[in-house]
Amino acid sequence: MIRLRDNGFASLRRDGESTRTAEPRPTEAPANQVFQRQESGPEVWEVRAGCIGRGHAGKSALFRALAEGPVGDFFPSGLHVDVGDPREVAQMIREAEETQRILQASGLPPTLQASQIRYYLYDGDQQRVVYKMREVIGQVLTHTLPDSSAEQQTRYEEYLKTLLNTQVLWAVIPCPPPNPTGRDRRRYSNDLRITSAYLREAFRLRAPDQPAAVALVLSKIDTLFRDEDEARAALTNEMLRGALGPMVHLIEKSLRVAEAAILPVTAFGFGNAVLREEAGGREGAPPTAPDDPFGPEAIWLLREGVAPQPYNLDTLVIWTMLFGLMNQESRGRPEAQAEIAELCRMLSDDLVAEDRWLVPLKGRLTE
C-alpha cells in the first residue's frame, strides 16, 4: 500500500497559487448559498470502466478492497483517490468494517443488484477525474442461455450495454485452488471460455473509433502463494501469458483494443485467506445441481483478527486511470488537452515510481 511520503506535500500546487476564486465569508452570503460549490478550476474528466467476470471470481471482494487500499491513499505524485464528500468517507469506513465482518464469517454473498461505484482523483483539493464502474451480477454471464426467459435476456442486454460506453474493461479470472482437481482445472478452462466470449462480444459491439484499454485481472493469487516473492517467481511473464492464452490472443488480434496488460491481484493480502471448512455454496446463492459446471467451489474467508491488505490494486487503479484518460487525450480544446496531458504525465510517473507488477500486452507500455 502506498503511503504519503515524509516530504510529500504534493497536493499543494507547484506555483503556490490557487486557481479557484476566493469564497465570500459566510456572513456575507445568503444562508442558502454558503455551501454552494464553485464552478471555477480545471475541468473534471470522466473515466468509465466495465467489468467482466463470472460469479465467485472475486470481483465484489476487489471492489470492496479498494477502500482498504488505493481509495484514501496518496500516490507518489501527490494525486489521491477518494469519495466525493466527508459523509461518504464516514459511510465508506462503516461499510469497510461490515465487509470485514462478513468476509471473516461467511464470505460475501453473490451480487444480486448492480450498483455504480464512483470515486474521484484529486490533485490537492481539486477533483480532476471522476471514475465510474458498475458492479457485475456474475450469474448473468453463466446463467443466461439462448432459451432463457425474456427477463433474463433483458438483464443480459443491459449488462452488455455497460461494457460499451467505457474507456477501460476489466476481465477478472480467479486463480484455481491449490492442488486442483480435474473439476477445478475444467472450471478454469470454462472461466477462460466464458470470459473470452463476453470480451469478444464487447469488442464486436464497440464503435471502431473507440478502442478500449483492457486489464486482464488475475484474482485470488494469495490462495496459491505465501507471499509476493513466491508469486512473482512462479508467475513469470511467460507463465501468465500462457495461462491466459486465449484472451491474450484475442486482445493482440483485436483492432478495438489500444492498450492491454495482465495484473495479478489479491483483495485479502498474502497469508490472510483461510479455506472455509463447511461444505456448500455461498450464503445467499441459489442452490445448484451437483453437475453444474459453475456450481459450488472452494470458499476463502478472511483470517480472524486481520484486516484486508490488498496487493497490487493500486497498480490496477493507476493503470485504469492513466489509459482511461489517454484514450481521450486528443479530444477537446487545446487547454483541456494540456490539462489531461499533465494528469497523464503524473499518473505515468506513479505507474513506474515503484516496483509495480503488471505484464504489458499491447500499446505504449510495450514500446
Image (spheres, rainbow, N blue to C red):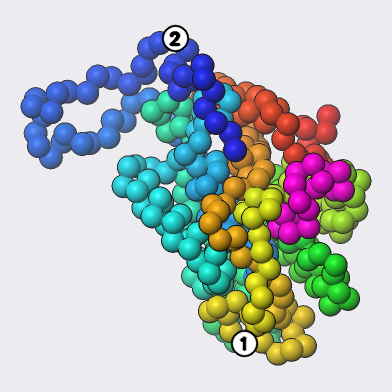
**Dot 2 amino acid type:** Asp
**Residue type of the residue flagged with mark 1:** Pro
Which residue is tagged 1? 287
> Which image quadrant is residue 334 in?
top right
Looking at the image, which residue is at 65% across and 72% down? 276
Part of the protein shown in magenta: 216-235
Q: Residue at x 38, y 55 (%)?
A: 94
Q: Considering only vertical position in the picture, is 267 above or below 297?
A: above
Disc nearer the start of the sequence (1/2): 2
Q: Eyeballing the image, is 146 above or below 69?
A: below
SS at mark 1 in the image: loop
| Camera-nearest residue between 236 and 234 | 234
In the image, taking residue 25 as reference, residue 112 lies left or right, namely right
What residue lies at 79% left-to-right and 41% top-to-bottom?
229
Characterize the local packing of mark 2: few (<14), some (14-19) or many (20 or more) Cα atoms within 10 angstroms. Answer: few
Q: Quick check: can you spot residue 165?
A: no
